[in-house]
């Protein structure tokens, strides 16, 4: 279903439009009337509006006897409200690796304000431009426009020169922060480079045109003296221009993995080089790409090289001489999971240190730890291979073509007795379980065949069970005992919360969700630090004494929805839940002595649709002295189309109402 949506986007996006003229906007040309505008028809409530942006891409000679890509970027933004100030904070991502890098210079930025009916300019001081290192390969050039106020217009431009020619930077015609009135991208592509253009999103081009002319190009040859001969030649250059006009802000919707999946954008991958360069076909198949990864020093080469340094460590973990592969794989996985610290958020599939160094230091990134896990499993004679994927936060991958920059995560696949087990030793999960963020669609096993995999949220389920026993004592206090077995993914989230805070903080969060104040009598969480067994939560509580003529009690007070998760009236994009849901709740209650049941919620059965993709069962039964209650909520799909939104919204509206109904007791 997800891939059908992407295919529709590709077809719809590339339809050309003609008859439009390019718009020329000059840096610094701001008039009083421009600053008097208070809102724009595209979105009268916008915090800011991107009035104009333009990117120009060209190829220039570098100092290595080849070419670099040069990006010239210019943006003009009208800041309308304080909530739009963030657009005056500019961050330019830069990458470097093995001596090649990206440089950002020629920064010019000005803020324009209307003061005493005059346009006042505030220029960026070069001392206010900073370079921030993020990790081994990434850094940010950062600056903030000065003197920004409500009503300011800002202009800024800069140049980025990149040694990395295999990709042209993605250009987003749409933003999650502001609507855009004009977004233009120009790529001047010489004949000797051929790029594959990949579109995203569903907005149409106002302009989509190409022009070709002859252009001179130069290559500087290396020289130890610091200068060298220059070779100049002529070839055709194609200038491709794409423009989108009046592009609405992409509003961030609840239950959407990554809004960037739906932004209207284009990106590029070098597919061929032609004469006068050495002709090369760079259109890789998936097997070609994964075979290169297997031999890459920064990825798979360490899996196949001599690993005698693992001999002692792995042998100590093996049982029965290594014959029980499942038991041994589990022991190795548990050892790495429990003894290695994961550092940072995974942004790449590549190593920044050797596997041997990771092994000795007991810490590393996601790819370093999980490739080490794979190496240890292989060293024990277990069939293990790495799998590359993109997490939900990182965005979708492109299944048809190996664009490895779209992948940011590595896990290990183990095959034992014809059964696949997928392992991630950087997370507190038991053997064979991946975190929900890994279920983002297309992935590839890094082997000779580049085996395709599909990790879909529809394939995993979170099953939880809770029970409550309630009495009413002679002091007028409700007294309750709760037993909970959260689902595997709820347990994962609770364990993370406890690790970051404490068990006490977790129990405080339960109390916050209850209307009536409660006091814990006892509380415990079993196996909080042992992800190999189910989490068990137990607590007893009491309410303040209350001897009223009428008592109100909701058996689901601690477990009911507090609000409808689908609160927006309309939906534009698919609903992406992290997993399927199966929640069961039981309650047994003794009718308070001296009271009778005055009002009782009616039982109800509710279906989301005819296919029972959602189901809610609310059953209540009574005797003269007891009340028995059961509630079951099941969502049997994790991915829904936007057209299903109204069904989900109404379904949860009824569930919310029912879960918050109360039992009324009246004094006899």
Image: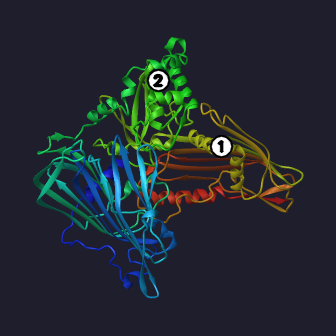
Q: Position of residue 600 (x, y in %)?
A: 72, 57
- Number of other residues with Cα within 10 Å of mark 1, as a class: few under 14, some 14 to 19, many 20 or more: some
Image quarter in which the C terminus is found: bottom right
Q: Position of residue 407 (x, y in %)?
A: 38, 43
Residue sitting at x 62%, y 60%: 657
Residue sitting at x 41%, y 81%: 35
Can you say whether 269 is above or below 45 in the image? Answer: above
Q: Viewed as shown, does residue 325 lie left or right of 593?
A: left
Task: Tell me the CA gap for discs 2 and 1.
Answer: 30 Å
Residue projecting furthest to the front: 225
Where residue 118 sits, quadrant-wise, is bottom left
Can you say whether 471 is above or below 109 in the image? Answer: above
Helix or strand or loop: what does disc 2 sit on? helix
The answer, for residue 420, to whether it is visible in the render is no
- Residue 376 image label: 2
Q: Pointer 1: what residue?
A: 498
């Amino acid at each position: 279903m997800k891939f059908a949506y992407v295919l529709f986007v590709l077809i719809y996006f590339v339809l050309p439009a003609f008859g439009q003229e390019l718009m020329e906007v000059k840096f610094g040309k701001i008039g009083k009337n421009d600053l008097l505008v208070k809102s724009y028809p595209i979105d009268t409530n916008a915090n800011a509006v991107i009035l104009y942006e333009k990117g120009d891409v060209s190829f220039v000679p570098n100092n290595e006897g080849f070419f670099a890509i040069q990006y010239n970027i210019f943006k003009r933004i009208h800041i309308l409200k304080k909530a739009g100030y963030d657009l005056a904070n500019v961050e330019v991502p830069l990458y470097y690796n093995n001596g090649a890098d990206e440089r950002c210079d020629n920064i010019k930025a000005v803020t324009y304000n209307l003061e005493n009916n005059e346009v006042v300019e505030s220029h960026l001081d070069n001392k206010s431009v900073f370079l921030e290192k993020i990790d081994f390969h990434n850094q940010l050039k950062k600056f903030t426009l000065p003197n920004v106020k409500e009503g300011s217009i800002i202009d800024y431009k800069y140049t980025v020169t990149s040694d990395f020619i295999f990709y042209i930077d993605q250009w987003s015609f749409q933003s999650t922060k502001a609507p855009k009135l004009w977004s233009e991208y120009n790529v001047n592509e010489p004949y000797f480079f051929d790029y594959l253009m990949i579109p995203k999103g569903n907005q149409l081009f106002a302009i989509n045109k190409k022009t070709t002319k002859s252009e001179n190009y130069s290559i500087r040859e290396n020289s130890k003296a610091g200068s060298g001969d220059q070779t100049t030649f002529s070839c055709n250059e194609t200038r491709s221009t794409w423009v989108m006009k009046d592009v609405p802000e992409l509003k961030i919707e609840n239950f959407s993995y990554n809004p960037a999946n739906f932004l209207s954008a284009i990106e590029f991958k070098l597919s061929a080089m032609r004469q006068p360069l050495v002709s090369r076909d760079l259109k890789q198949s998936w097997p070609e790409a994964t075979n290169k990864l297997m031999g890459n020093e920064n990825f798979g080469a360490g899996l196949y090289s001599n690993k005698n340094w693992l001999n002692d460590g792995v042998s100590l973990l093996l049982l029965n001489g290594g014959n029980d592969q499942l038991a041994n794989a589990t022991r190795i996985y548990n050892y790495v999971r429990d003894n290695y610290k994961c550092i940072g958020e995974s942004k790449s599939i590549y190593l920044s240190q050797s596997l041997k160094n990771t092994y000795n230091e007991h810490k590393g990134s996601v790819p370093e730890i999980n490739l080490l896990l794979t190496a240890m499993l292989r060293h024990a004679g277990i069939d293990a291979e790495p799998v590359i994927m993109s997490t939900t936060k990182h965005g979708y991958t492109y299944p048809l073509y190996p664009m490895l920059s779209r992948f940011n995560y590595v896990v290990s696949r183990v095959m034992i007795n014809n059964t696949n087990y997928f392992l991630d030793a950087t997370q507190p999960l038991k053997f064979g379980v991946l975190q929900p963020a890994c279920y983002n669609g297309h992935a590839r096993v890094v082997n000779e065949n580049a085996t395709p995999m599909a990790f879909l949220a529809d394939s995993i389920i979170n099953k939880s069970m809770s029970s409550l026993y309630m009495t009413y004592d002679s002091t007028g206090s409700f007294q309750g005992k709760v037993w909970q077995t959260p689902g595997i993914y709820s347990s994962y989230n609770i364990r993370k919360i406890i690790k970051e805070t404490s068990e006490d903080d977790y129990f405080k969060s339960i109390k916050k969700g209850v209307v009536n104040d409660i006091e814990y009598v006892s509380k415990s969480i079993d196996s909080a630090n042992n992800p190999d067994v189910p989490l068990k939560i137990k607590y007893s509580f009491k309410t303040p004494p209350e001897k009223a003529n009428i008592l109100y009690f909701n058996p689901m007070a601690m477990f009911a929805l507090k609000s409808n998760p689908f609160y927006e009236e309309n939906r534009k994009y698919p609903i992406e839940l992290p997993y399927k849901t199966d929640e069961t709740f039981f309650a047994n209650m003794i009718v308070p002595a001296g009271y009778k049941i005055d009002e009782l919620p009616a039982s109800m059965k509710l279906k989301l649709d005819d296919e029972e993709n959602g189901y809610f069962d609310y059953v209540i039964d009574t005797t003269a002295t007891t009340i028995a209650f059961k509630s079951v909520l099941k969502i049997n799909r994790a991915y829904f189309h936007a057209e299903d939104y109204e069904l989900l919204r109404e379904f949860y509206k009824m569930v919310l109402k029912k879960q918050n109904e109360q039992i009324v007791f009246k004094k006899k």
